[in-house]
Image (tube, grey):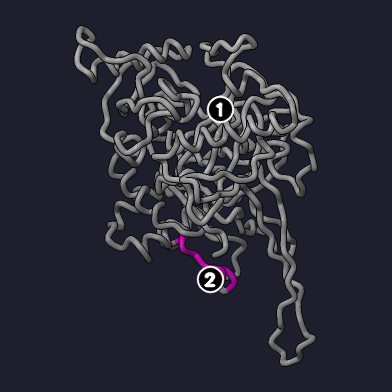
Amino acid sequence: MTTVELRFPANRYHGTAWGRHVNEGVAEWPPSPYRLVRALYDAWKRKCPHLSEQDVLDVFTTLASKLPRFWLPKAVSAHTRSYLSSNTGETADKSLIFDAFVAVSPSAPCIFEWEFSLNERQRRTLRELLSALNYLGRSESWVEARLGGQPPIGEPTCIPASEASGTGELVYLACPISSQDYRGKRPWFDALTYSSSELLKERLSGPPAMRSVPYELAAGSITSWLPAQSPGRDRGISAAVLELHGKVLPIATDTIRIAERVRGRLMRQFEESKKQIPPLIHGKDNEGVPLKDHSHLFILPRTNSVGRIDSIFLFSQSKRFEPDLIKAVAGIKCLRWLDSIKVTATWMGRGDDASFRHRIDQVVSTTPFVTIRHWRRGRGSVIEFAMEEIRRECRNHSLPEPLSVEPMDLAGRFPPVKFRRNREGDVTRPGYAFRLKFPRRIAAPFSLGYGCHFGLGQFDAEA
């Protein structure tokens, strides 16, 4: 399989579907494969001219050979209305213009998946082209694109209608015609750059290298409004996400400090409302004995591509969130770190942990793994001891034993020694980074070892 992940940092995607007028106010969703291929062509010509035409042609031919499937975030259809001058010299002569867009969370990926594999040369070429993209559709549609990315657990959100059950909404997406099926006069590669002016001049009904393909979009994938629903009324919730915003975001090496701040804020809200702090938060039973089955809350700070913490993932593996806990999580509005810098926190969503995790069979450390037990003579070398502790922790967390445990130099973007590796009052312990290969796909991210409920020992897909 080959996957491409798109994220929209400005919270919106602007694009008008082929065959629709801009003033219909209907935004394209999902982004069409034809638009993506043409954007990659533009990125090649403007930013990556050093890539050979044959390498780019090879990648495009492969991308056009199959129809992709999509995993899409929740989206809201919206628009703005502007009265623009008609340039007639009369100040009152203005035209109403609609600008339709789809609003999405900047942290939620839109994933394309094709049922083919690329060779290493193709992957290198496509990776460079994707990194050169800075917008898709209108220039307001800022985009971060990368090769890879894991689809979330569950069925795809949008699939070709020929493979669908007929229960969703029918949408038409512009897709490139494969080079084998192309019958136009100009070369297939040149036909991908066909412009609207050429279309009008030659009086054609559509670009020669494009076809309109019916897709089925899952019901509820895009709405025109979000229901006003109190988080405290939810049931069956076991996970939530907070997004952090600020001029200076916490650095990844402060992971455990930020997780402790979140736990402290949750406990304080219960104390202020004079309610008993649930065991799910403080990690102890009614007798004050620490829970050892990892059934209490995991607080995992998550980092962006430059190593800054931009979200907090909270989940429980076996217990549901009570309404009071959901209300407390949604009530976190700001966090302080380093005693002087404040970031705002925004409630982004809730669901079960499958809503925010994906399945993968190979993971790498994104924060250091810290052993619970101490090394001593007779337990092999220090690194052998740490590798055996990984296997032991996998058993404790009901995970399959890894097929391989390979040491690494970095945990995410930083060496383990750069991270804070102890909670308040505890001594600092050594940290390690590993690449793990499992016999089957498991839900990620997950965390192991000392401080695993506070973000240490996190494992996820390799960036």
What's the distance in space between the residues labelled 2 and 1, CA to CA? 44 Å
Mark 1: which secondary structure?
loop
Q: Quadrant for residue 223, please give it.
A: top right
* Residue at the bottom extreme, as displayed: 89
Q: Is residue 225 magenta?
A: no
**Position of 385 compared to 323: left or right?**
left
Relative to 172, residue 285 above or below: above
Q: Residue 198 got which mark?
A: 2
Q: Which secondary structure class fits the magenta region best?
A: helix
- Judge whether residue 187 can be spotted in this image: no
Relative to 172, residue 160 above or below: above
Work out whether mark 2 precedes mark 1 in sequence or the reverse, and give the earlier one: 1
Tell me the kind of residue under disc 2.
Answer: Glu
Residue 233 in the image: state x and y as whole percent: 79, 30
Query: Could you tell me if the residues under marks 2 and 1 are in contact, i.e. CB atoms within 8 Å?
Result: no
Q: Quadrant for residue 285, please give it.
A: top right
For disc 1, the marked residue is: 153
Residue neighbourhood size for the residue with mark 2, other residues' Cα within 10 Å, grouped as few (<14), some (14–19), many (≥20): few
Q: Which residues are magenta?
A: 191-200
Residue occupying image coordinates x 54% and y 36%:
261
